[in-house]
Amino acid sequence: MSMEIYKPSLRTSLQGMWALTRRELKKWMNEPIVLFISVIQPLMWMLLFGKSMNITAVFSPRVLADLTIPDITIPGDYVSPPADGLLTIPGSVIAQYLREVLYELGGRAVESVFGVQDYFSYLAIGMISMITIFTSTFSGLSIVWDRRLGFLYKVLSTPVSRSAIIFSKVLNAALRSMFQSTIILMIAVVIGVKLNPSFNLLNLAGIYLAVFLFSVGLSSLFLAVALRSTRHETQMAVVNLVNMPLMFTSNAFFPVTLMPEWLKPLAQVNPVSYVTDALRQLTIYSTDLQILLIDFTYLTIFAVVLSTIGVLLSWKYLTK
Amino acid sequence: MVDVIVVENLTKIFNKNIVAVDHVSFTVREGEIFGFLGPNGAGKTTTINMLTTVLKPTSGTAYVMGYDIVKQADMVRRVIGVVPQEYTADEDLTGYENLILCGDLYGLPREISKKRALELLELMELTKFKDKKVETYSGGMRRRLELACGLINRPKILFLDEPTLGLDVQTRMAIWDYIKKLREEYFMTIFMTTHYMEEADNLCDRIAIIDHGKIIVTGTPSELKNSVGSDVIELTLREIEDVSERLLRIEYVKNVVRKENVYVIQVEDGEVAVPVIIEVLKNHGYGVVKLSLRKPSLDEVYLMYTGRSMRDIEESRESAIVQRIMMRRARR
């Protein structure tokens, strides 16, 4: 019998990593219900909260319809003065004028704080971050399951590199997040998000890159936490504990400028703020390249540092 | 013969105080089926996990095909195949997909994986079910698929951890046949653990009995059984005369106890002794009416070396394992 030993090489480690990634993607695609359910939650936020929380409407003329202002009479010289020399401005005209000014000012205030005139668009893009947070933080759970079901044991006894095991799960989370982001973005556009007029394929590529980097960093973190864990309950508890604060200490729902002073520093280091801002720059804002560069630099550092930590820990801790 | 596994003082201590494997040393020769026999918690699986590089030893070393299991773990993984105790295949994938996945993990070129996967499915008689999800497989089919996965890289050494655990008697025998067939077909060395006496006796060329993390004795099944004592022949003579003296003069015979015309004879090498005894008696004009040969079983071997009967321990273990498998399915 002839025996061939396939020497370790970049090709074989990529092959192993891709095989493991494909396995997870296949399982995910076999259960479309999972995708459906994971899209539902951000969709509800967008549709129910985003549409109701119509901040600009607070200033709409309709809201001030009851405003009654008495007529004002002003004495003075006029080119063609009325017979009695007094000019009377009807209160209704003033009210009308005030309503319009208020609406205009209100809109500008909203725009200066949110970057867009409607809160719905603001929130809808934030929901791409939300679905990515969910997908990435839950990725640690799959390694716990693999350990419990014995699959991890088999993989560990093969020559596939330990880092490929982690990377396959990271890649799986990132690819899923990118796919889900596409769905969220499409739905958002259909139900009323106004993309900036210069939106093109390059923006779309930017969105994918931002989601990818953010997901790589976040899922590496949660996989590192789950490396030795055999209890999925613990992992679930950690994920549930972390998800909400992670979202609310960022600009995903509300702008940092409106936050109390003690919360601001937190929001300024939270990577969710950077991915969300990058996404908004690329979709609804008129893109500010300098800010976008800062966002991407932060996200790249986040992804590189955490995935490096994940790999180092996987070498040390995956094998007991 | 070449030693393909050399184990020197291998030790594993869990949580700083639980000694699972205690300075174990042994060698496995090329082409043999070497069995680790022992009860639950004896350290069999821990040893196999260290040899297959899934666990790191606390101290001691081992070489598999000449590669150090700690320093050259990656090379060890390339030359071995592992069939773990539990079912490790992905239940959501088909049998064929699982095999291709295993091939990819070994970095095999895809054409080779595909060819071997089909060949192994055929060998394990799973061809009919290759495109069915593994969750629909029976216990025996899963075990065969695990065997196939462990063979996809054409290993020089195959590690089998309790290959027939929780299977019914017929499936168990079928798996034994597959294992024998594998050895012949691929000329592999097989290292297996088991707690079934019959399995060790039937399959293994050499056995090490392990208990409390220590190897108690090593040898071929017949050596071990001979070490316990002799075979016993019970024969009934047609004649009433005492032939004890004559029997004792036969070289294999160690002891004779007579009760009327029934003789209980302790012999070495029973199978060889029986025709000799009949021949001698016949030459002297005696007739044998009835004869039976009793071999000492590994049970007795085990009892002698560990002071415990293995069957008592194993009954509870078996049910625990079956329960664990059921629980695992229920969890899904």
Image (cartoon, rainbow, N blue to C red):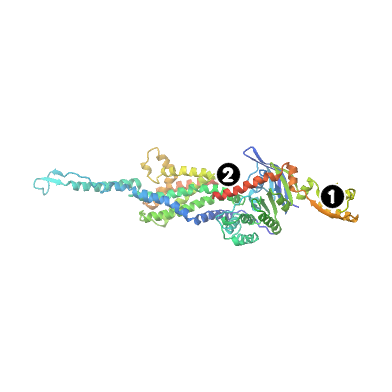
Tag 1 residue: B262
| Residue A136 located left or right of residue B239 | left
Question: At 52% from the left edge and 56% from the top edge, which residue is drawn?
Answer: A26
Q: Nearer the viewer, residue B265 or B64?
A: B265
Residue A19 position by quadrant: bottom right
Q: Position of residue A300 (x, y in %)?
A: 47, 48
- Name the amino acid, label 2: Tyr
- Name the amino acid, label 1: Val
Q: How far apart are the alpha carbons under marks 2 and 1?
A: 67 Å
Crowding near the residue tagged with mark 1, few <14, some 14–19, many ≥20 C-alpha atoms within 10 Å: some
| Residue B84 located left or right of residue A59 | right
Labels 2, 1: front one: 1
Residue B118 showing in the rendered view: yes
Residue A280 showing in the rendered view: no
Question: At 53% from the left edge and 55% from the top edge, which residue is drawn?
Answer: A22
Q: Where is residue A102 in the image (x, y as percent from the top left)?
A: 26, 46
- Kindly identify which chain the residue marked by label 2 belongs to: A
Crowding near the residue tagged with mark 2, few <14, some 14–19, many ≥20 C-alpha atoms within 10 Å: few
Tag 2 residue: A317
- Kindly identify which chain the residue marked by label 1 belongs to: B
Q: Position of residue B313 (x, y in %)?
A: 68, 44
Question: At 65% from the left edge and 45% from the top edge, which residue is drawn?
Answer: B316
Q: Nearer the viewer, residue A89 or B317?
A: B317
Q: Where is residue A250 in the image (x, y as percent from the top left)?
A: 41, 44
Q: Are marks 2 and 1 on the same chain?
A: no
> SS class of the residue under badge 2?
helix
> SS class of the residue under badge 1?
strand
